[in-house]
Every structure is written in C-alpha cells, then in structure tokens.
C-alpha cells in the first residue's frame, strides 16, 4: 500500500472515530482500486481493471485513480502506478481509438463478437463501443497529474501520437455521416447495446460538436451529439493546448486543439441548449442538430450533473442551475424517489435503481452543506450492509443492487469523504 494512502487512512482513523460505520466504509472504499484492481506490469505500465469485469475501461481506470493524484507528489509508489496507467492508456488509444475497453494481454477476449470492423478487431480490444469520454479521461488525468506533481513523464512520443490521433478522430466525427469509418452492430443483448441504422446511428447535421456512438453508461446514444461528453472534450482540449504549448513545444497541436475547442463550444451553445417551459434554458443530454433533443440525465460521468466537476461551468452558472433543477426532479425520466432513497439512475440498470456515483456527484457539485450532509447520510445508509458502494440499487431496498465489485464507485465515495475531512465539515454534517 503506498505510504500516502496509509497516511490518509490514519487521518481517517482520527477524523471519523466518532462514526464507526463511515470509518469502516472509507477504509474499504478509498484504497479499493489499489488493493483489488491494479496490476503492475513487467513493461512498466499499470493495468487497472474495473472490478467484476476483467477488462480495463479507459474511462473507469482514469476515474478510479483520479482521487489519488492529489497524494502523488511525494509518493514514488503511487507515481509509478499512475504513470504506468497513463503509458498503457495512450498505447491502447494507438491500438484502436474507437475502443472503450482493453484486455490485460493480447488474448482476443471480448465482451461480444460485434460487427464493427473488418478485418477483425485487435486481440487487445475487449469492446469497441465508441464513446467520446474514453478519449477525454486519459488527457484529463495526465494534465491533472502534471499540474499536481510537475512530472512530464506522461508526455512522451506515444502521448504525442495518441493526442494527434484523438484530434483527427474528433475532427472526423464532426462529420460522422460523411466521413466516419465507424459502425457498430451487436446481434445479441438489449437494443441499447447496438447502434441502429446499419450501425451508423440516427441522422445528424453538422453542429461543430463531435459525434459519439455510446454514452458513458455504454448504452447507445439516441442522438449522436452527447452534450456532456462534448463539454468534457472542450475542457480537455484546453488542457491539451496547454500541454502542447508548455511541454511539447508544438504550436500546431496547440492551435488545432484551441480551434476544435471553439467549434465544439459554439455547437454546445447553438444546438445543446433548449428552453424548457418550467426550468427555462437548460442543457440537453443529446441532440442531432436537427431540432431533436433527449431531455434527461444519466447517472454515469460525464453527465449534466457533473458539469462543474468536469470543469466546464461553475456551480453557480445559471443554465447549469436550471439544468440541475430539471435533472433532480421527476421531469428527468431517470430520476427516482422511493421509500429509502432518491436520485438519478440510468436506462443501463433496472427502473427505480439509482447510482452511488450520481449521489456522490450530486454532493461534489452542491453548494449547500445541508444537501451534502443528507447525501452523505444516504450513502452510508445504502451500502446494502456490505461497506461498499455499488452501481445501481433499489430506491426501496438498497440490499438489491447491481455490481458488488465496482471500484470506481468506491474510490469516488472515498474522494468525497476525504474532501469533507480536509474541509473540516464531516463532523458537523453527521452530528
């Protein structure tokens, strides 16, 4: 166990001593990724799998280690883990930038034999559901790691090649119908597991945003422009421009990143905002650039709820606040209230199941200490008597849940509690 993690657990012993269940949960959840889903490879990389599925998602693995970055400056062991993960992620992107999840070895294991590419997909690829956020997350954590530690170790030739490929792909997917080679059809499973229209998706018009086949829940998009994912892309394009300027000395990459960021931002504001009769101007979850919108939020991140956490807009941004009121209401088709809990779920999980990730994100993006306190108490009460967080759980019975081993949810919960410990708020909230 890295020394910095041990120090955090020792701090928790003191700060949470009056709250034994929370202390037990924190000691289980915060180090869960490092204890159970991290493997150090002989080639110097790190393989961080998601938990009860043996593959490494670019999204999940990034989110799993993000809370540890704040501790990495003086911890060589933790730096080895994070730098190894970044090295492996950018190698994976060069293998297939459209893939979302990868194998530990080139063993040809995969979730399903989908119709997505000829010839057959790489033996490294577990699944090839294209999601914008799969490419955002590695840039995000490489930037945050650099800013925290000062280390530029991640920004090697592999990074440069992967970054250039990401820019090229996002450019291509601005004109998905006309220019994209990507198609995806799954012959088994629920309808949300496949992209309709011969794997191409619903028709879209040019907006400036970049197209996504799937949501971060791994469900197919209804309309191709996934607004929160484009917001995330905008943020990391700003990061990439800064890296290109200050580390790589690549003025061309900097210029390209900033130009694409501007086009995406214009698309979000011209096509991703709609006027709701109750809430006023709100961000749509998806749009097609042809006047159609999906008005909802999904529990997984990037989500509309997570906009401030992503760094796209402030917590007090008027359109975000309007959107927040909408998605935390019954007008959001995936907001559920039950006898035990209330919050945002997902079409990926059963009806009336909400996600611990969305509850933590609600707390992380709130400016109301009373709301945060209620959410912390709810998180403690809905562990299903396991001491761990889960994917989704029933709003009427938290012992009914999906995914008993979901490291991202555990680590994110730990991030929230550590933040509240550092802010000296946790005691008052649980009093």
Image (cartoon, helix red, strand yellow):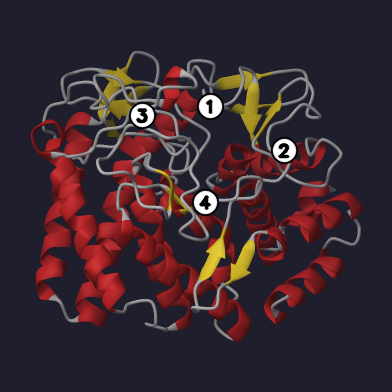
The answer to whether marks 1 and 2 mark residues whose Cβ atoms lie closer than 8 Å is no
Which of 170/209 is in front?
170
Q: Are marks 2 and 4 in contact (CB under 8 Å)?
A: no
Up the image or down, 187 lies above or below 148; here it is: above
First of labels 2, 4 by sequence position: 4
Q: Which residue is mark 3?
A: 285
Image quadrant holding the N terminus, namely bottom right
At a point 53% along the width and 21% down the height, the residue shown is 334
* Residue at horizontal 38 percent and vertical 69 percent from the top: 143
Report the Cα–Cα distance between label 1 and label 4.
16 Å
Pointer 1 or 2: first along the chain? 1
Residue 367, position in %: x, y? 55, 46
Q: Earlier in the sequence, mark 1 or mark 3?
A: 3
Q: Is 192 situated left or right of 258 in this image?
A: right
Which one is in front, 95 or 174? 95
Q: Which residue is mark 4?
A: 60
Cα gap from disc 3 to disc 2, whole angstroms:
26 Å
Mark 1: few, some, or many residues within 10 Å (few <14, many ≥20)? some
* Residue underneath mark 2: 374
Can see residue 72? no
Quarter of the figure with residue 375: top right
Q: CA distance from mark 1 to mark 2?
A: 26 Å
Residue 324 spot, x, y in % from top left: 46, 32
């Amino acid at each position: 166990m890295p020394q910095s993690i041990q120090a955090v657990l020792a701090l928790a012993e003191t700060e949470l001593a009056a709250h034994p269940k929370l202390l037990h949960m924190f000691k289980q959840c915060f180090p869960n990724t490092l204890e159970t889903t991290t493997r150090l490879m002989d080639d110097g990389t790190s393989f961080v799998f998601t938990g009860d599925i043996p593959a490494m998602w670019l999204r999940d693995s990034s989110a799993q280690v993000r809370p540890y970055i704040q501790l990495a400056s003086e911890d060589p062991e933790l730096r080895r883990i994070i730098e190894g993960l970044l090295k492996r992620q950018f190698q994976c992107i060069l293998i297939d930038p459209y893939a979302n999840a990868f194998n530990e070895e080139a063993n040809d294991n995969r979730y399903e034999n989908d119709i997505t590419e000829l010839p057959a997909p790489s033996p490294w690829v577990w699944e090839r559901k294209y999601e914008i956020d799969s490419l955002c997350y590695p840039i995000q954590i490489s930037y945050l790691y650099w800013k925290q530690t000062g280390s530029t170790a991640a920004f090697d030739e592999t990074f440069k090649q992967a970054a250039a490929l990401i820019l090229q792909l996002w450019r291509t997917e601005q004109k998905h119908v006309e220019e994209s080679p990507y198609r995806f059809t799954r012959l088994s499973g629920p309808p949300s597991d496949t992209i309709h229209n011969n794997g191409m998706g619903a028709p879209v018009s040019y907006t400036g945003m970049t197209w996504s086949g799937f949501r971060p829940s791994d469900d197919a998009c209804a309309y191709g422009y996934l607004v929160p994912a484009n917001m995330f892309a905008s943020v990391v394009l700003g990061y990439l421009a800064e890296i290109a300027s200050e580390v790589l000395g690549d003025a061309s990459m900097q210029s390209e990143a900033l130009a694409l960021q501007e086009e995406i931002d214009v698309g979000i504001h011209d096509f991703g905002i709609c006027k709701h009769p109750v809430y006023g101007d709100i961000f749509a979850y998806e749009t097609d650039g042809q006047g159609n919108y999906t008005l909802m939020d999904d529990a997984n991140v990037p989500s509309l709820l997570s906009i401030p956490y992503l760094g796209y807009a402030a917590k007090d941004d008027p359109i975000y606040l309007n959107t927040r009121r909408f998605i935390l209401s019954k007008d959001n088709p995936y907001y559920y209230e039950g006898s035990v809990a209330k919050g945002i779920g997902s079409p990926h999980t059963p009806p009336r199941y909400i996600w611990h990730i969305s509850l933590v994100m609600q707390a992380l993006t709130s400016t109301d200490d009373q709301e945060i306190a209620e959410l912390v108490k709810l998180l403690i009460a809905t562990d299903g008597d396991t001491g761990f967080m889960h994917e989704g759980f029933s709003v009427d019975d938290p012992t009914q849940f999906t995914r008993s081993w979901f490291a991202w949810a555990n680590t994110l919960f730990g991030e929230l509690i550590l933040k509240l410990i550092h802010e000296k708020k946790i005691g008052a909230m649980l009093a």
